[in-house]
Structure formats: C-alpha cells, structure tokens
C-alpha cells in the first residue's frame, strides 16, 4: 500500500540469523494448539522508529547497527527457538534452527516523510513486502527488517508468526531482544511455551488446514489520535450518563468507534443493521492456575456487545452492556466454554455457515503494552506502529507516546468516506498528527 501513496527508492539485502547455540533435541518439536491450527500463517507486525539524534554517531554507521542487532537477535533466538524453525505441517514446527530472515533496507527518503505523511498506509514501507497480515507468506516464522533512512534515522519492524504467539508475545520478544542489544550478557528468564497443553487438538486429530483466513479486499486504514484530555472528557461523560462509574479508556474508545462506524454503515446501507462488537481477551491471568507472564502462545477468547435497536446505539448504553458482558465473561470457564474454540470446531466441521444475525465489528487493544519502552540502547522509540490489516471493521488501539491513544481503523472505502467526516467522532479524535 505504501508504494501507491508515496514513491521511495530502496535497496535491500537479506540473510538468515540462527540461534547463538543449537536448540536441544528435547525441544525439537513445537506443537500448535487448536487455536493456532485454525489460524493461517499470518504475522503480528509491529514497527519502531528511532531518530538520527537518538543514534548519535551510529547514524552514520549502518553496517555497525546491523551487526549489533544481528548478534543480539541470534542470542535472543536461543530462548525464542520456535521462530527459527520450519513448519512441518499445520500441527507442529520442526525447531531445526534454520534461522530468522533479517532484511536490511536503505530508503532514499527521510524518516519524517514517512511518519508525517497524511496517508498512514505509507508507514507500511517499513514492513517486508507481502508479509504482515498475508494468509500464506513464503517467509519463515519470523521476519525482521532494519530500515535505514537517508536522514540517518532507522526503523525496526518485527513480524512474528501468529501460529506461535500473540501480540503480547511480540512485546516480550521485542523487550528481550532490546535488552540483549543493550547488554549482551544480560540474564533473562526464558519464555514458557504453552504449545497444545491448554487447547489440544480435537479427538479426531489436528486440523489439516487453517479455517480462519484474514480478508483484506477493499479495505483501507486511517489513523486517529485521542489526546489524553479528550479521553478523560469522554470517560467522565459516560460515567455521568451510565451505571458504569469508572469506565476504562478501552471501553469508551471502542464504544465510540463502534457507534460512529455503525452510523457510517447505516448511512450507506439505508437502514440500521443489528450489530455486535467483538473484543478478544487474554486469558493468562484469568485461568487457574494462572500462566506465567512470560508464557508464549495464543490463549484467547472473546466476548461480544450486541446492539439490536438503533436507539440503543449510544455511548452510555454500549458501555453499560459491554461492562456486563465483560463481567459475565470473567465468571465463565474460558477453557471448557471458550467461545473462540467452539467457533473453530464448528468451522472445522465444514458445515456452511449460517447467515449472521449481527453485523460484526472487532476491537483489539494493546494499550496496556509498553511498546514505547523498547530501548535497544538509543532510548525509547519516537514512534511505534502496526501494519495495515488484517480485516474490515477492525479497530486497533495502542498508546500514543505519553499523551493519548492511537487508533488504527480498517474499513472498506465506501464506509470510510462517511466515517472520516463524522463530527461526533472528530470532537474527540484528530485524524492526523505529526510525529515530529
């Protein structure tokens, strides 16, 4: 997408980075859980930008930067060894230390031209072409790209297979890699691999192929900033007008996005369509016994907020219903009654899906994840980002520096053209903000 919005010239090279020491034979195989078998070979794609001022003298030494990151990545892969292996089939990884692809790309444009461009899809130039959310990439289980801008600044994009872990694991991997870059002798706690211990294959055996694709056709992404003061105003309004006394940032922003996007869909369709907002939740701290914070895997489920009547599509009602659904969700046994697993098992039967009663929207939040703390030795990133994708009617929320929340909204172009002019939404969100 970036190339359509901005022409940049680039030169690249690629090499494989292997673990610093061989993976023991006792760790030869990494089995996929049922959730991971259901997913296609997509990636969790995050990017980090560092200015030439942060890099100092290193900004003129791209080879040294690359070598530093390659060496620390090799050490990091000793603990994160499945990412350096190969998929045997849809059920397991052969942890054979093949290596992780490391790309060096030199872009003949300043970093400011990429970060400050009004089309937020331009930032995708930092991700390897044909990776990110693609269903069946030819790349391996992890792809790292180091981008050198002609101003001396750099960006590091990290694409980790969703077949192994989730966004939280992307954060873990990044923190540990950055730590080893700052201190090659740092002693880190190795991750705990959940594998198929919680959500095993069905009795009939592993799924032969994924059943949950990502669909990008016709979608576009827009980026919005919610300043902290505006978020506080919104939270106060919802608290005063509903039974929820302390609504969270994610609750009020996801409700606002849900309402305003549904309004755009209604305008284009000519009538209100019953709608639901799907929100995924990490189960690491909900299940008993709790999983360690450094556990790697997709331990997820979801809950939904349903709106059947247009009159109920207002912020106080949406947040009130959302809070009730969240509380109900927390009382369930989300292993035996996992909504996501039950859906996967139905899809695996191959039965044609029934017509959906509700139009579906999805909100994913990583606001609690400290992506702005990823310090490779040059300080905190001046900007972080996530690649465009993976499907329509999706809202990704993440922190924006120390002053607010950044929202990446995926919609088809017709609905986006209405949504981006919504006055109620724009009262709280800015459609564009310079990083520097």
Image: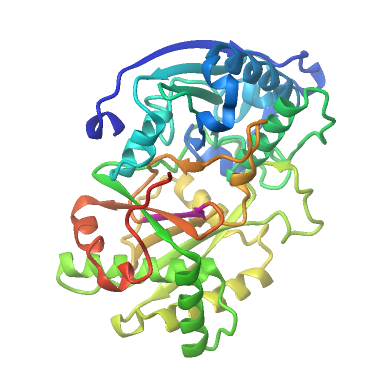
**Residue drawn at x 61%, y 41% as measured from the top left:** 380
What kind of colouring is applied to the model shown? rainbow
Query: Where residue 169 appears, x then y in whole percent?
Result: 64, 41
**Residue drawn at x 77%, y 51% as measured from the top left:** 291
Give the camera-side residue of 115 and 344. Answer: 115
In the rendered image, which quarter contains the N terminus?
top left
Residue 336 located left or right of residue 302: right
Question: Can you see residue 87?
Answer: no
Q: Quadrant of residue 34?
A: top right
Q: Is residue 79 above or below residue 381?
A: above
Residue 330 located left or right of residue 293: left
Give the camera-side residue of 250 and 270. Answer: 250
Query: Where residue 349 appears, x then y in whole percent?
Result: 46, 46
In the rendered image, which quarter contains the C terminus?
top left
Name the chief secondary structure element in magenta.
Answer: strand
In magenta stretch: residue 86 = no
In magenta stretch: residue 399 = yes
Query: Where residue 139 appears, x then y in whole percent?
Result: 48, 20
Q: Is residue 119 above or below residue 431?
A: above
Question: Can you see residue 141?
Answer: yes
Query: Where residue 2 appears, x then y in whole percent?
Result: 30, 33
**Residue drawn at x 22%, y 58% as measured from the top left:** 415
Q: Is residue 351 above or below residue 183?
A: below
The range drawn in magenta is: 394-400
């Amino acid at each position: 997408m970036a190339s359509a919005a901005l022409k940049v010239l680039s030169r690249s090279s690629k090499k494989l980075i292997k673990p610093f020491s061989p993976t023991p034979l006792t760790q030869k195989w990494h089995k996929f859980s049922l959730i991971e078998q259901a997913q296609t070979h997509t990636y969790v794609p995050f990017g980090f930008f560092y200015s030439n001022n942060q890099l100092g003298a290193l900004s003129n030494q791209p080879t040294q930067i690359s070598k530093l990151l390659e060496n620390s990545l090799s050490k990091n892969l000793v603990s994160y060894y499945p990412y350096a292996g190969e998929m045997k089939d849809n059920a397991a990884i052969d942890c054979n230390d093949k290596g992780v692809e490391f790309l060096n790309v030199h872009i003949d444009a300043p970093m400011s031209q990429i970060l400050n461009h009004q089309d937020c899809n331009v930032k995708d130039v930092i991700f390897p072409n044909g990776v990110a959310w693609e269903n069946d990439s030819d790349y391996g289980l992890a792809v790292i790209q180091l981008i050198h801008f002609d101003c001396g600044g750099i960006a590091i994009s990290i694409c980790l297979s969703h077949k192994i872990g989730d966004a939280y694991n992307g954060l873990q991997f990044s923190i540990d890699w950055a730590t080893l870059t700052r201190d090659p002798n740092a002693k880190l706690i190795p991750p705990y691999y959940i594998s198929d211990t919680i959500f095993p294959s069905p009795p009939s055996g592993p799924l032969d192929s994924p059943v949950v694709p990502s669909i990008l056709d016709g979608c576009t992404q827009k980026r919005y900033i919610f300043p902290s003061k505006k978020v506080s105003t919104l939270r106060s309004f919802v608290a005063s007008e509903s039974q929820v006394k302390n609504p969270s940032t994610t609750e009020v922003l996801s409700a606002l996005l849900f309402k305003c996007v549904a309004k755009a869909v209604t305008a284009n369709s000519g009538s209100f369509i019953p709608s639901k907002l799907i929100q995924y939740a990490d189960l690491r701290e909900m299940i008993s016994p709790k999983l360690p914070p450094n556990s790697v895997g997709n331990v997820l489920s979801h809950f939904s907020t349903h709106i059947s009547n247009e009159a109920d599509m207002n912020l106080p009602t949406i947040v009130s219903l959302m809070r009730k659904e969240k509380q109900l969700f927390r009382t369930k046994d989300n292993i035996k009654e996992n909504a996501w697993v039950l859906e996967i098992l139905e899809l695996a039967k191959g039965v044609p899906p029934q017509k959906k009663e509700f139009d579906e929207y999805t909100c994913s939040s990583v606001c609690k994840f400290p992506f702005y703390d990823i310090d490779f030795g040059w300080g905190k990133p001046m900007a972080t980002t996530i690649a465009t994708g993976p499907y329509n009617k999706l809202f990704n929320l993440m922190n924006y520096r120390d002053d607010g929340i950044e929202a990446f909204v995926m919609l088809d172009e017709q609905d986006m053209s209405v949504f981006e002019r919504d006055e109620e939404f724009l009262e709280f969100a800015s459609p564009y903000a310079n990083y520097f």
